[in-house]
Image (cartoon, grey):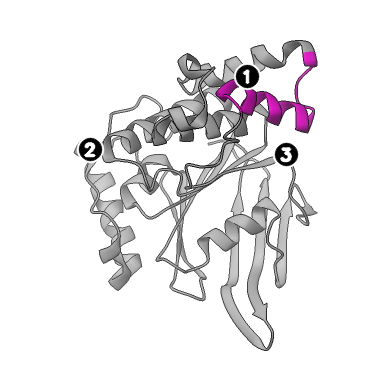
């Protein structure tokens, strides 16, 4: 990838949760940089502060010390320039149709002219392959379709960053594999910067340009791995990098799925 100024910079970020006299340090001394149009993946054991870090980037969680910047400015609150897709399927407004969910996001953020809002919604539903469900309600959709609509809604407001917190963890293996492929295709079509949390080594390697490996709580950076040179999921390089990530995770690696490149759909968009 061409050298660009970072979009996100974290300098010695610390996140502490306080309740009365009790203090819990979730994240300790985390530093990294994410460039525009990069796919940046965060991986680590449960409870290591991955989600806390993502919430801080989204502007939902204040940091306790250090610095978290977007384009050189401190992140202090949420904004439509950072949209989040969560693991939970129930992210959509249940009383609105698929189209209405997208239109609502466009209207509330002022991201589309009133005359074009329905066409804009349909464009993003087409992008994620759910335009046939445009007039259905969320309860009529499968889990995979709900996640596609959530991604479409996030992309429709044209964010600079798409933040994804284990968005495929609760899906069956086939749907998860297909959505991995589609995320790469969406990235290819939009160039949106993606920061994604996963528990899957295979997913981290398949989707990421950089993979930040975190330690157990309090989570800090164990290593940031560059995966841009891996261009074949069936290659020795892919297998070696998977083994390296497992070695970094150490005893915690047993909770991570064993990488299996045969379960992936070969993608022309892989790590481009």
User: Which residue is at a point 59% across and 55% down the rendered structure image?
Assistant: 54
Residue 82 in the image, given as x and y percentages of width and height: 67, 43
Quarter where residue 271 is shown: top left
| Alpha carbon separation for disc pair 3 and 1 | 16 Å
Number of the front mark, 3 or 2: 3
Number of the front mark, 3 or 1: 1
User: Which residue is at a point 57% across and 35% down the rendered structure image?
Assistant: 94
Residue 68 in the image, given as x and y percentages of width and height: 70, 59
* Marked residue nearer the N-terminal end (1 or 2): 1
Residue 124 vertical position relative to residue 23 in the rendered view, above or below:
above
User: Which residue is at a point 36% across and 24% down the rendered structure image?
Assistant: 268
Q: Which mark is residue 263?
A: 2
Magenta: predominant secondary structure element?
helix
Q: Residue furthest front?
A: 95
Residue to which mark 3 is pinned: 80
| Span of residues in magenta | 96-114
Q: Is residue 96 visible?
A: yes
Number of the front mark, 1 or 2: 1
* Magenta-span inclusion, residue 119: no
Label 2's element?
A: helix
Residue to which mark 1 is pinned: 121
């Amino acid at each position: 990838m061409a050298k660009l100024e970072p979009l996100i910079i974290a300098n010695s970020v610390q996140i502490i949760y306080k309740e009365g006299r009790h203090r819990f340090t979730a994240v300790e001394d985390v530093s990294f940089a994410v460039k525009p149009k990069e796919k940046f993946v965060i991986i680590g054991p449960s409870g290591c502060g991955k989600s806390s870090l993502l919430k801080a980037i989204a502007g939902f969680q204040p940091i306790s010390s250090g610095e978290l910047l977007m384009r050189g400015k401190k992140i202090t609150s949420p904004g439509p320039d950072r949209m989040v897709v969560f693991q939970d399927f129930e992210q959509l407004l249940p009383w609105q149709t698929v189209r209405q969910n997208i239109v609502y996001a466009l209207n509330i953020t002022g991201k589309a002219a009133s005359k074009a809002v329905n066409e804009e919604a349909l464009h993003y539903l087409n992008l994620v392959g759910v335009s046939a469900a445009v007039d259905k309600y969320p309860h009529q959709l499968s889990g995979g379709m709900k996640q596609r609509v959530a991604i479409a809604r996030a992309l429709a407001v044209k964010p600079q960053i798409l933040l994804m917190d284990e968005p495929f963890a609760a899906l069956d293996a086939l749907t998860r594999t297909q959505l991995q492929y589609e995320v790469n295709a969406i990235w290819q079509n939009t160039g949106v910067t993606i920061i994604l949390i996963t528990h899957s080594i295979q997913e981290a390697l398949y989707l990421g340009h950089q993979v930040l490996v975190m330690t157990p709580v309090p989570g800090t950076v164990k290593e940031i791995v560059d995966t841009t040179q891996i261009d074949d999921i069936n290659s020795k390089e892919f297998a070696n990098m998977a083994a390296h990530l497992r070695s970094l995770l150490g005893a915690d690696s047993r909770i991570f799925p064993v990488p299996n490149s045969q379960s992936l759909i070969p993608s022309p968009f892989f790590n481009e």
